[in-house]
Amino acid sequence: MSNPELRAIYEADQAERQGELPPDLTARDKARLARVEALLAEGALRSAEDHLHAAFVFQHGDRLEHYWQAHTLALRAAELGHGPPARWLAAAAYDRWLMHQGRPQKYGTQFRSVGGPFELYAVDPETTDEERARWDVPSLAEAHVMAERLTREPPPGHGSPSAALASVAVPGLRVLLVELAPGEAIFQPDALPQPTPLDADGPHPLPTYLPAALAPRSFGAGYCAVDASGAFQATWIELGLPPEQPLWLPWDSADGPPPAMQGFELGGRPCVAVAAAWSAVSRERLPLVITRAGPETCWLVSGRLSIDVLARIAASLP
């Protein structure tokens, strides 16, 4: 028989993620996780269902060890005879554990939206669809279709244009500042990327303008310019953005009032400057300049430099 208290905790965890998220979701998640940790220590998990219920609660934790615990609990649920949800959750928790270290996921269960359309987070190319099927994970092609569906129909908590805190539009570019729902967190790797030398194979999309004494480097999924100490001062990354798709930028009210935004044209390109923004490569709220890179893409240029300098860098990108 399954543990009735654990079942109730699991059902509350799932129910609160349907529709509008409660304002204290983070606190509720932590309380649930603490109780499940106590039940685990007491040896109260016995059935396959118990292990699956606990795994879902750990999956909603906020540390690497929580995701790993979710993975091992889901594996145990599968070993005890639970059906497809257990195998899928074991794969999803493992993917989340990898993703929060800045590493490619193995199976392809994790998605993210970095200010625009949802995309499948980087996947290990060695994993086959046959291996995914053994873990009840959809094929890679199906995962990309899911990313498109998430873009059309964002899940609860992900902002929509009607809920924008602010909006700036210039010909060819529209940017919306969207408030995070209570309890929602932006994906932030536990291990942030570090600048590395440029791959000699190239080519690399480098700006023709950089301030003196700054040198270009690879930086996660994009590029950066570092100073003499090796610390990044500016970053640039290309992001898919169809002409009709606005760029969504998240903002947490806990960080203060919404930052100022301004639209302008520079070097024949539409640009929007944001005084402070969330970053995928830093825990700082840094100034950001968005500009068109092409009909279907845009550049996100951010850093510890002034907006004027970041805009000059943006205008000189290919």
Image (spheres, rainbow, N blue to C red):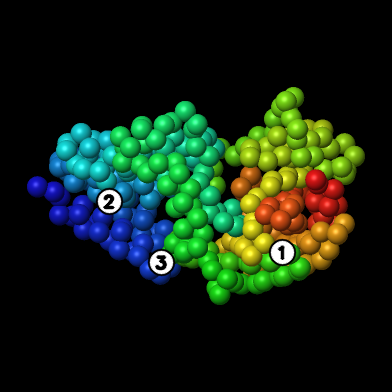
Q: Measuring from the top left, give residue 134's x and y in whole percent.
A: 30, 34
Residue 289 seen from this side: no
Q: Earlier in the sequence, mark 3 or mark 1?
A: 3
Residue 264 seen from this side: yes
Marks 3/2 in contact by CB < 8 Å: the verdict is: no
The Cα–Cα distance between marks 3 and 1, rounded to whole angstroms, is 30 Å
Q: Nearer the viewer, mark 2 or mark 1?
A: 1
Q: Which residue is mark 3?
A: 21
Where is residue 206, by image quadrant?
top right
**Horizontal placement of 300 versus 113: left or right?**
right
Q: Earlier in the sequence, mark 3 or mark 2?
A: 3
Q: Amino acid at mark 1?
A: Leu
The Cα–Cα distance between marks 3 and 2, rounded to whole angstroms, is 21 Å
Q: Amino acid at mark 2?
A: Arg
Q: Earlier in the sequence, mark 2 or mark 1?
A: 2
- Up-down: is 255 above or below 141? below
Residue at (40% x, 41% y) in the render: 139
Badge count:
3
> Label 2: few (<14), some or many (≥20) within 10 Å?
some
> Label 3: few (<14), some or many (≥20) within 10 Å?
some
SS of the residue under disc 3:
loop
